[in-house]
């Protein structure tokens, strides 16, 4: 199954880094975050990727074109330039990198990939958030409801302390939110080819008319992921994800305690 990674946007609150590289290339634990997203899919056996790039696409193209060389050790003969690679990690990934335009919106990027897709069910992800999502369970859920689209719904991580109130009197003050009521779009999707019929051109953001109209037609369903998920929206997010990497197995690759429906 093909996995589309949306990696072409210009807007970012990580301007100190994205002035020189696209956001998916911002490093977490010494590796671009886009590789961490791909690791999640790899865990479930999905290794056929299409990277829909735009802003600073040459950076992403050079990265994947040179990846095999840069990710492995090698011996080179200085007399004739012949090199022998000694693989340090065997990645059985197929990666297509497609320039979908600098100003194209997320929906338009998908539409531009129509000829690259195989007219079958495919997965889609933003390239700036990670979570230990059971993609096989998500696919099973997608097939069960018969609709055109599935979005993985998550409950946002706590960013502020919470107050429990009795009238205007605070009865409990905590540094973390103990319960959640809101479900949000995680940026992980499963689509049927018919979703592309809901996109009219480059100007359309996936999160606006296409998903709104799929919802109107009863075609969008949510797979609820109740475990770890975290975006990289800000420098604070980046630093937090780096800290998690430094502690050992990052939680987005820890599938031993997953809970979804």
Image (cartoon, rainbow, N blue to C red):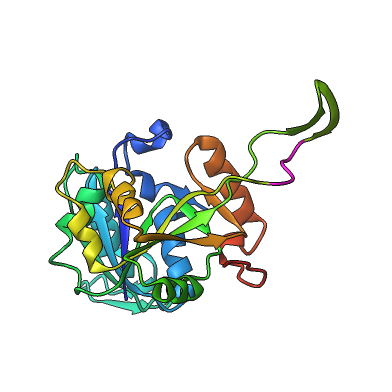
Residue at left 41%, top 65%? 38
Residue at left 49%, top 36%? 234
Residue 68 lies in the magenta-colored region: no
Quadrant location of residue 76?
bottom left
Instruction: Left or right? Give the position of 86 relative to 95.
Output: right
Q: Eyeballing the image, is 147 above or below 210?
A: below
Residue at left 54%, top 61%? 224
- Pick the front one: 79 or 45: 45
Q: Residue 51: horizontal and vertical position, in percent?
A: 27, 59
Please provide the residue range marked out in magenta: 175-179
Residue with the most extreme front position: 217
Q: Eyeballing the image, is 167 above or below 49?
A: above
Quadrant location of residue 256?
bottom right
Residue 128 seen in the figure: yes
Q: Residue 14: horizontal and vertical position, in percent?
A: 43, 35
In the rendered view of the protein, which quadrant contains the C terminus? bottom right
Instruction: Left or right? Give the position of 174 relative to 57.
Output: right
Q: Residue 246: horizontal and vertical position, in percent?
A: 63, 54
Instruction: Left or right? Give the position of 128 relative to 219.
Output: right
- Pick the front one: 258 or 48: 258
In the rendered view of the protein, which quadrant contains the N terminus? bottom left
- Pick the front one: 47 or 196: 196
Residue with the most extreme right position: 171
Residue at left 74%, top 45%? 178
Q: Main secondary structure of the magenta part?
A: loop
Residue 178 lies in the magenta-colored region: yes
């Amino acid at each position: 199954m093909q996995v589309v990674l949306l990696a072409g946007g210009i807007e970012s609150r990580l301007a100190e880094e994205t002035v020189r590289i696209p956001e998916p290339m911002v490093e977490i634990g010494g590796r671009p975050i886009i590789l961490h997203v791909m690791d999640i899919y790899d865990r479930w056996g999905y290794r056929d990727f299409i990277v829909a790039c735009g802003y600073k696409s040459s950076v992403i193209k050079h990265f994947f074109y040179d990846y095999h060389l840069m990710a492995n050790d090698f011996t080179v003969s200085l007399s004739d330039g012949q090199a022998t690679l000694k693989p340090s990690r065997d990645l059985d990934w197929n990666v297509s990198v497609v320039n979908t335009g600098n100003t194209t919106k997320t929906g338009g990027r998908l539409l531009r990939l129509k000829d690259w897709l195989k007219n079958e069910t495919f997965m889609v992800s933003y390239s700036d958030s990670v979570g230990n999502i059971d993609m096989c369970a998500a696919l099973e859920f997608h097939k069960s409801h018969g609709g055109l689209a599935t979005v993985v719904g998550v409950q946002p991580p706590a960013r502020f302390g919470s107050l429990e109130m009795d009238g205007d009197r605070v009865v409990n003050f905590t540094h973390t939110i103990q319960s959640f009521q809101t479900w949000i779009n995680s940026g992980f999707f499963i689509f049927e080819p018919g979703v592309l019929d809901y996109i009219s051109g480059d100007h359309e953001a996936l999160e606006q008319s296409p998903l709104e109209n799929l919802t109107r037609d009863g075609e969008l369903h949510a797979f609820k992921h109740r475990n770890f998920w975290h975006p990289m929206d800000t420098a604070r997010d980046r630093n937090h994800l780096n800290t998690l990497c430094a502690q050992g197995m990052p939680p987005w690759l820890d599938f031993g305690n997953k809970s979804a429906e």
